[in-house]
């Protein structure tokens, strides 16, 4: 090539480089860390392996290479890919430590353009992917922006059923002693808020309930001990008329609770949407349906409710909540049912159909808004292999792997319901979920997975053309 | 009073209420938590006790009462006064847990005005005091704003003497392998930064060295794991010409280090001064001279150097650093030598004179700028009582208390040097500092102290007139 052509090429190359901000979220334990670790790993190996047939750039041999490059926001903790790989490559392999709060990693993917302007000018183009990981719990707070303190209290009161009702007894006992109209007693508020926070932790950790509001209470970060996290819903609305509560004096308990709630709306919820969410281009939401299926009706319905709340963040059309703040950019959302390898392969379509039914309504709305949505089942990092059991001549599908107690195990975990289960389903205890350790991996091979290529194709495929 | 007069009174009262933002700082273990706990405690008891004779409002019987009221910034953790009092009132009494990062508490002090407009209109006026606690280490970073990365590296290199030199061997071993001009290797930078951070922790925790830069490395908060804390001074400047380093390419190791240093200047150092420091009205800096005297020359000189650096934040006149950012409001700064009760009373004037000599130069400058400065020795919460020992007929001054091993102890810790000690002083091992547990306190009495009233008079006295 002449010097001029080379210069030209370099110039075009730079101006054609593409950026995409890919957000990864999910409720706690949905598998965010495993997904990102695998995503990075697959990309790093994409040019030398053939394990991504469903990613067109890979199938067509257009992946040149990938590497990690310095992230754009220096104040956000880095995603600890190396630590995760160390766990996965250790003997026996273990799962990476889950992340907390937000973290970031930037990947540069070099590829051969397929068509268009790029093809004529360039040998290669680069796609920069900023992968941002954040807790799905933060999305559960969006609906708070549309409710004032008393409306939120009313909603919390209405939702006090099942496990929640039992678990809430202790904090309600404390809360009962509060006179909302009396002058503020900060110590009392702090004590009740502590009891309320304990209750939220118990819901989440002991009962696997996902709909935990306000989400920042269980992941406080640097706000630990700050008054903005020292409020709670007022659950004794029936004892007072609306007028009485509305007229409460400035320094009263209820006035201070309202003030803190408002501060939370403005400085915690809105801040997240402004600082982070508004910059996302693509979103993957990871959902673990299997654990809640195993835990029972209460837990499963709670997860559904959490997903419902979480969907509000993608209903740009219907909900004016986000539009009031800014115009969101996300044009593709992938819902991935994770841990697909924890059931037998013929159950995978059921996982997808179950997830589809859960997000069905939002799906229709977002399609209308031009946002592409998709559901699939994946295993970011494979933990089992599928096989067959012969029981007295009858052949069953089964999975085998090493369980968390380091025991080899072969089993049929049960059928995943195709639709949201009915009352009757729960009476038969039909599902037997078990956690497995990751399969043994070699450091010169990409991590074993199920349909990571399909997920990457949906999320990034159109940027690699 | 007529209704109108009452209304009038209330209106004047409101418009005359005063606010003061009192910042409390000091290097780690200087006694910030003890000071704030005692300050709040003394104010809460001021109307019913006579233990504050040096506070004019108290001596003149004009203190009506005080109470804690909701703090102004809801996103800052609350200072945990109650937990501190629980420790102090337990049996045996223990010191409050030290605070980390920043915390806040608001006090409303009601008093009878002495003179002026207020006297004629009002029965009482209220002074609102926002007490803000922050690590003194954050002030050590101010000088970074005046140095670029290479100048800072040069300064760090020049300061590598004594304990620092020995302790730095491990991280320098790592750092030596870095080629500053090579393309960035983020993993290597992270590893060297980890080693550098370990070194800073060792300096601080094992050797009691206070001059730790960058200050946020040892108290990272939510920045833990973020690239902005993954830099370090480049200590091999002699191996390269300035030109070589200045011409380093954009993606080189040294360029990335420079970029992170700059981000730290802008988003960590400046942010603190903008978000917090600019709003302070009064400042107390707590200094523990006794522990470094005991630890030896190296430690003592290091503390002096830290105090020197810290003084820059109050040199508004000379230093253009802060004026470039904003115009600071602080009009009074108190330097308090803490733990005065850990030496015998006749040594107190020496403590003051020693501290005065350390801050002498800045004192002159700030006086010229109209900022009032003062030095005194205090014991926020008393841990010993002073007495006399009779040794073979000779009478010595002594202190007695319960040491941290719960043993009763009577001793003469030694003489505090009146001036900054000479080389010869350090050869005699003259000082024997011992930590004591707080004296037993009663919950209906104010905490026992030495000269807290004098400190409060300096910091708030003019606002209580």
Image: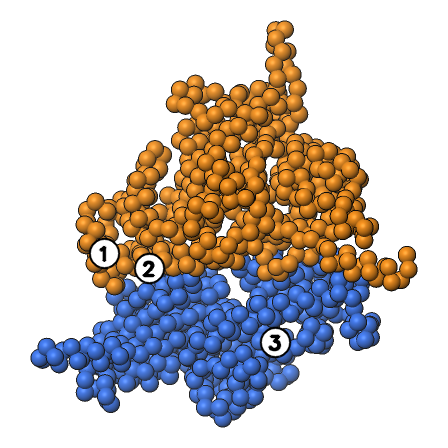
Chain colours: A blue, B orange
> Do callouts 1 and 2 point to residues on the same chain?
yes
User: How many neighbours does mark 2 have within 10 angstroms: few (below 14), some (14-19), or many (20 or more)?
Assistant: some
Location of residue B262 in the rendering, given as x and y in whole percent from the top left corner: 36, 58
Whether residue A393 is visible: no
- Residue holding disc 2: B259
* Disc 2 from disc 3: Cα separation: 37 Å
Q: Nearer the viewer, mark 1 or mark 2?
A: 1
The tag earlier along the polypeptide, 1 or 2, is: 1
- Residue holding disc 1: B246
Which residue shows up at 64% across the image and 83% down it?
A423
Which residue shows up at 60% across the image and 21% down it?
B346
The mark found on residue B413 in the picture is: none
Against A439, is A16 above or below? below
Which residue shows up at 41% across the image and 79% down it?
A281
Q: Nearer the viewer, mark 2 or mark 3?
A: 2
Residue at the far right in the pictured view: B2
Which quadrant does the N terminus of chain B fall into? bottom right
| Whether label 1 touches label 2, CB < 8 Å | no
- Is residue B241 left or right of B117 when viewed as pictured? left
Against B284, is A130 above or below? below
Q: Nearer the viewer, residue B445 or A302?
A: B445
Q: Which of B243 and B333 is in front in this view?
A: B333
Name the chain letter of the residue that bears numbered label 1. Answer: B
- Is residue B195 left or right of A147 when viewed as pictured? left
- Is residue A190 left or right of A391 when viewed as pictured? right
User: How many neighbours does mark 3 have within 10 angstroms: few (below 14), some (14-19), or many (20 or more)?
Assistant: some
- Residue holding disc 3: A145
């Amino acid at each position: 090539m002449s010097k001029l052509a080379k210069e030209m090429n370099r110039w075009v190359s730079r101006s054609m480089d593409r950026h995409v901000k890919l957000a990864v979220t999910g409720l706690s334990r949905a598998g965010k860390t495993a997904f990102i670790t695998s995503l990075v790993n697959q990309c790093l190996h994409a040019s030398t392996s053939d394990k991504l047939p469903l990613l067109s750039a890979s199938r067509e041999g257009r992946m040149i290479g990938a590497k990690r490059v310095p992230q754009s926001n220096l104040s956000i903790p880095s995603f600890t890919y190396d630590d995760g790989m160390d766990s996965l490559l250790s003997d026996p392999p273990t799962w990476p430590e889950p992340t907390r709060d937000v973290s970031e990693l930037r990947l540069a993917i070099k590829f051969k353009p397929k068509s268009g302007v790029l093809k004529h000018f360039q040998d290669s183009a680069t796609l920069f992917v900023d992968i941002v990981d954040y807790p799905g719990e933060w999305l559960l707070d969006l609906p708070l922006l549309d409710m004032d303190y008393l409306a939120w209290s009313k909603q919390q009161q209405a939702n006090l059923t099942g496990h929640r009702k039992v678990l809430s007894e202790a904090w309600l006992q404390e809360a009962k002693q509060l006179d909302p109209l009396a002058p503020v007693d900060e110590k009392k508020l702090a004590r009740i808020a502590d009891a309320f926070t304990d209750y939220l932790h118990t819901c989440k950790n002991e009962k696997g309930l996902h709909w935990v509001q306000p989400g920042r209470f269980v992941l406080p970060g640097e706000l630990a001990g700050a008054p903005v996290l020292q409020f709670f819903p007022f659950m004794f609305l029936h004892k007072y008329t609306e007028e009485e509560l509305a007229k409460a004096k400035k320094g009263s308990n209820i006035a201070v609770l309202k003030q803190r709630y408002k501060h939370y709306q403005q400085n915690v919820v809105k801040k997240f949407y402004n600082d982070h969410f508004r910059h996302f281009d693509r979103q993957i939401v990871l959902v673990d349906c299997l654990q809640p299926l195993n835990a029972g009706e209460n837990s499963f319905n709670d997860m559904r409710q959490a997903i419902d709340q979480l969907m509000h963040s993608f209903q740009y059309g219907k909900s004016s909540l986000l539009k009031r703040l800014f115009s969101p950019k996300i044009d593709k959302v992938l819902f991935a049912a994770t841990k697909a390898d924890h059931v037998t392969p013929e159950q995978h379509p059921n996982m997808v159909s179950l997830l589809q039914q859960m997000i069905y309504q939002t799906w229709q709305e977002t399609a209308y808004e031009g946002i592409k949505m998709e559901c699939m089942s994946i295993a970011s990092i494979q933990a089992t292999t599928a096989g067959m059991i012969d029981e007295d001549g009858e052949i069953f599908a089964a999975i085998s792997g090493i369980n968390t107690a380091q025991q080899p195990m072969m089993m049929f975990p049960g059928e995943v319901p195709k639709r949201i289960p009915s009352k009757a389903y729960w009476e038969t205890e039909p599902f037997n979920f078990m956690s497995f350790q990751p399969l043994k991996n070699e450091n010169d091979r990409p991590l074993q997975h199920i349909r990571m290529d399909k997920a990457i194709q949906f999320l990034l495929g159109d940027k690699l053309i």
